[in-house]
């Protein structure tokens, strides 16, 4: 399986529940896809069974559910090539090795996320060490001064997440108007350690001899230049999504999506299935609920392909849970 977002995680659960062995490769160092990375603190109200759940809590619940069935998960493993066919099996080549399987399920969502990086002088050299493009771990920000750059939901989500931990959070945006939801911005501004600085652009980031970062801000619309002292800078400028290598997998990528047969979720390449945001067919709705449903259709079709002797329908979970798993790679 390729892609450890919400839909991939649920697919890992369902396929393991039905006795298939699963290897799930994910390009990011974290599981949970868009929910975990793009809107961890935003409330979602349309996932069945959850009256309200944050992206982070939903991702964690999906990870917990999948972990109960112990799929093999490899993080930091962008799938770059898929060789083979259903008869000989497929080989999925990733940055972290090659993984084999009798079928492949693509749950790559909006593709591999590439963060939009800060164009500031000095930013590239400090990336990973003092400048982050994912929400840094709590230990890296506890009691520290953090500059968050951006004006969308991602940046403001991160300010809300960092404020309870950090000594100070400075939100820098190049416009006075924010794209982020007004309510989130109001909540962020109301938090004690949060300072909002607009309209400013980060021009330069340098390490000072005392170890702090000097963040030089260039004023727009006539605002005076500013220098802010920080320990950590977080770029919350969003992500570029690109199906990237999937274009070379002969699955018929159209724009950023892969057409499938909605009766099976199989792509035009036999034995390779797709579900979730990346899968396209007439009437497709890009929602979590739709993706989870597609996983059920794909799992049933995969079962028919790998175990043609079994019934055409997926049995209910209670009747299969706990049964010894026949080995199907
Ligand atoms: C701001 C925002 C708010 C949203 N709010 C809602 C909402 O309220 N309700 C709702 O139903 N939906 C909402 N959505 C949509 C929902 O998040 C998506 O429908 C859902 O994330 C799709 O899940 P997925 O697993 O298909 O894809 P993704 O979440 O995109 O996950 C795909 C995963 O695959 C990985 N990947 C991609 N390419 C590769 C590769 N080559 N190799 C390895 N790994 C790869 C990615 O890194 C990613 O982790 C929202 C989306 C956004 C951006």
Image (cartoon, rainbow, N blue to C red):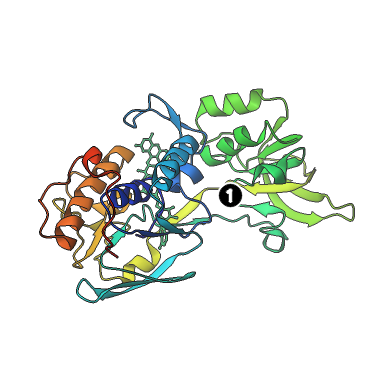
Q: Is residue 184 left or right of residue 208?
A: left
Residue at image location 16% in from the left, 60% down from the top: 307
Q: Position of residue 95 (x, y in %)?
A: 48, 70
Q: Position of residue 26 (x, y in %)?
A: 44, 58
Q: Position of residue 248 (x, y in %)?
A: 32, 72
Q: Position of residue 46 (x, y in %)?
A: 34, 30
Residue at image location 63% in from the left, 54% down from the top: 118
Q: Nearer the viewer, residue 29 or 308?
A: 308
The residue labelled by disc 1 is 134
Quarter that holds the N terminus: bottom left
Which of the 4 image quarters holds residue 91? bottom left
281 in relation to 172, above or below? below
Quick one: label 1, few (<14), some, or many (20+) residues within 10 Å? some
Which of the 4 image quarters holds residue 159? top right
Secondary element under disc 1, as helix, strand or loop, is loop
Count up the numbered dots.
Answer: 1
Residue at image location 71% in from the left, 37% down from the top: 170
Q: Nearer the viewer, residue 232 or 180?
A: 232
**Ligand 1 within 8 Å of the CB at mark 1:** no
103 in relation to 83, above or below? above
60 in relation to 105, above or below? above
Quarter that holds the C terminus: bottom left
156 in relation to 87, above or below? above
Which of the 4 image quarters holds residue 50? top left
Q: Is residue 99 left or right of residue 146?
A: left
């Amino acid at each position: 399986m390729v892609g450890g977002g919400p839909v991939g995680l649920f697919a890992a659960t369902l396929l393991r529940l039905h006795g298939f062995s699963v290897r799930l490769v994910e390009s990011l160092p974290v599981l949970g896809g868009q929910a975990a990375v793009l809107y961890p603190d935003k409330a979602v109200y349309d996932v069945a069974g959850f009256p309200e759940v944050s992206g982070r809590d939903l991702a964690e619940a999906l990870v917990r559910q999948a972990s109960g069935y112990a799929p093999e998960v490899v993080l930091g493993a962008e799938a770059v090539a898929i060789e083979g066919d259903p008869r000989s099996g497929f080989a999925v080549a990733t940055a972290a090795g090659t993984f084999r399987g009798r079928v492949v399920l693509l749950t790559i969502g909006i593709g591999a996320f590439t963060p939009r990086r800060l164009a500031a002088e000095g930013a590239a050299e400090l990336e990973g060490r003092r400048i982050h493009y994912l929400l840094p771990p709590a230990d890296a920000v506890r009691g520290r001064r953090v500059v968050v750059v951006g004006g969308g939901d991602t940046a403001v989500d991160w300010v809300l997440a960092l404020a309870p931990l950090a000594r100070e959070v400075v939100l820098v945006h190049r416009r006075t108007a924010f794209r982020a939801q007004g309510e989130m911005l109001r909540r962020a501004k109301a938090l004690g350690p949060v300072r909002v600085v607009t309209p400013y652009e980060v021009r330069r980031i340098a390490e000072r001899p005392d170890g702090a970062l000097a963040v030089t801000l260039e004023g727009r619309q006539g605002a005076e230049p500013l220098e802010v002292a920080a320990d950590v800078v977080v770029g919350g400028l969003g992500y570029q999504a690109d199906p990237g290598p999937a274009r070379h997998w002969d699955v018929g990528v159209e724009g950023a999506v892969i057409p499938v047969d909605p009766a099976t979720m199989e792509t035009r390449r036999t034995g390779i299935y797709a579900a979730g945001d990346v899968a396209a067919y007439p009437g497709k709705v890009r929602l979590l609920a739709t993706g989870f449903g597609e996983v059920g259709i794909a799992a049933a079709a995969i079962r028919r392909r790998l175990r043609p002797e079994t019934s055409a329908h997926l049995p209910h979970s209670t009747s299969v849970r706990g049964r010894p798993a026949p080995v199907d790679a």
